[in-house]
Each structure stands twice: as C-alpha cells, then as structure tokens.
Amino acid sequence: MKKYIVSLIVILMTFGIGVYVYSSSVDNNHEYKDMSFEKYMEKLDGNQSFFLYVYRTGCPACEELEPTLNKVIKERNITIDSIEMSKNRNSHKDYFVEHNIDSTPMLIHYKNGKEDARLSNQIITEKKLNQFLNDHNDK
C-alpha cells in the first residue's frame, strides 16, 4: 500500500512539473522581447529610440493581435520590446497613470527617450501596425 501511494505521488508530481514546463514555454512563444520595468526606464534614461508593446496576459485583444504582431516582427526583422502589465501595474501604478499607459494592447514609439507616437484604443490591424512602424521607423 505504501509503494502504491508513493508511486501515485511521484506520478502526480511528474505530471505537475510537465504541465508547468509546457505552460511556461507556451507563454513565451512570441517574437517581441519582454523586459523589466527597470530595463524600460534604463532605455528612456539612455535617450534610446525603440518600440514598446504593452500587453496583459488574458487580454482578448492582445491575444488576437499576437499572431499579427509576431508575423510583422518576423517579416520586417525588427525588435519590439514589451512590458506585461499584470506583472508591473501594481508596483509602478503611479508611473503608468501619469504617462497614460492605461489600456492594452498598446504600441508606443520612443524617440531619443521621449514618447513620439502611440497606437492604442483601437483595433490594431496588420495594415495599421505596418503603417505605424513605417511612420516611426528611425532607421
């Protein structure tokens, strides 16, 4: 009986670890580059120019945009940094409120560390996304 219980516990633990590893790999299956809030602030303080994708896990509009965003990033061979709001909202709420980063999905272009343009509060189609990237490409 003891062997049966130990075997059952080992099987359940193995299954749980497998599910965790699988879900972790699926969550990171995107072309944009997740970064911490601290890294984001370093880029701003360093007067860098970059695109920032703001999203939230579980956001239906973000999930709908993801395949299009991945496709455009691959086709254009560009880098788009990202911040996941669920992980950062509470600890940096004042900053996000002050800078009107209050909805997802959102794409922001920063030029020399300052916000240059943003695409938000609308359905972001592939055409709109490409137009935004064309209009604000620093290269």
Image (spheres, rainbow, N blue to C red):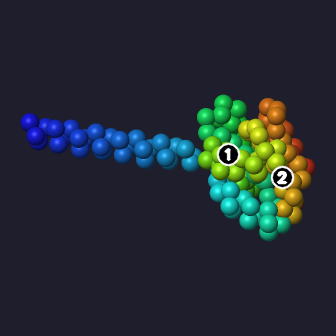
Q: Residue at x 21, y 38 (%)?
A: 8
Q: Is residue 32 visible?
A: no
| Residue at numbered disc 1 | 89
Badge 2 amino acid: His
Crowding around mark 1 (Cα neighbors within 10 Å: few <14, some 14 to 19, many 20+) is: some
Nearer to the camera, 99 or 33: 99
Residue 78 image label? none
| Dot 2: element | strand
| Dot 1: element | loop
The vertical placement of 86 against 58, above or below, is: below
Q: Using residue 14 as the reference point, say whether residue 19 is left or right of it.
A: right
Nearer to the camera, 24 or 2: 2
Residue 109 image label? 2
Q: Position of residue 17 (x, y in %)?
A: 36, 46
Q: Using residue 48 as the reference point, say whether residue 67 is left or right of it.
A: left
Q: Nearer the viewer, mark 1 or mark 2?
A: 1
The vertical placement of 131 against 34, above or below, is: above
Q: Residue at x 69, y 36 (%)?
A: 62
Query: What distance separates the C-alpha of mark 1 from that of mark 2?
Result: 20 Å
Q: Quadrant of residue 79?
A: bottom right
Q: Which badge, 1 or 2, comes first in the chain's sequence?
A: 1
Q: Are marks 1 and 2 in contact (CB under 8 Å)?
A: no
Q: Quadrant of residue 60?
A: top right
Badge 1 amino acid: Arg
